[in-house]
Image (spheres, rainbow, N blue to C red):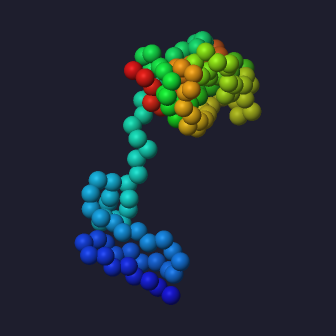
Amino acid sequence: MQIEDTVEGSRQVKGTEGAVHVRLVGGAGVDASNAAIVVEQGQFDYETVAASQSDQVLGVTGGVGDFLHKLVIVVATAATAATSIKDGGGSAISILPNSPGGGIGVYVVELNIVSTAGAWKVTTGAGVSVIAVGRFTP
């Protein structure tokens, strides 16, 4: 059975019984001409971390509440690719080991974590660099 929702001032959306129906109303984030809703993840900063860095703070000062969305890890020498993060002065959290199974290449690690102890810090081995993406205290 086909169901048609009609709402004054919006585009009609058809579906089947039991389906979710969406009413598109003009405004920010809506592309009514293509029946699409535009979703943005938000504005993120990024910071590069060169090879052989130890506890590089993300953001100017970093702080509690900083959001680490993802790390883009570029491995140039697999044998020295170790990458870790720290939440403030806490213990290191290993993200990528030396000699990762995929070898040389780019690894994208989605984290979506919030700092509870201080600035996020990144440590890189001699054969790896990182682009950290998130919201960091300026």
- Residue 77 can be seen in this image: no
Placement of 128 over or under 53, stated as above or below: below
Q: Nearer the viewer, residue 54 or 118?
A: 118
Looking at the picture, tell me which residue is in the foreground, 106 or 66: 66
Question: For the C terminus, which image quadrant?
Answer: top left
Q: Quadrant of residue 24?
A: bottom left
* 88 left or right of 24 in image: right
Q: Residue at x 47, y 19 (%)?
A: 62
**Taking 52 as reference, is 79 left or right?**
right
Residue drawn 34% across the image and 76% down it = 12
Residue drawn at x 73%, y 22% as measured from the top left:
98
> Looking at the image, can residue 56 be seen?
yes
Q: 94 or 136, which is in the foreground?
A: 136
Residue 64 place in picture, x, y as percent:
51, 24
Residue 17 is situated, as x and y percent measured from the top left of the image, at 51, 81
Residue at 51% of width from left, 16% of height from top?
A: 57
Tell which residue pokes out farthest to the bottom in this image.
1
Number of marks: 0
Q: Nearer the viewer, residue 23 or 81?
A: 23
Q: Residue 83, percent across and down? A: 65, 22
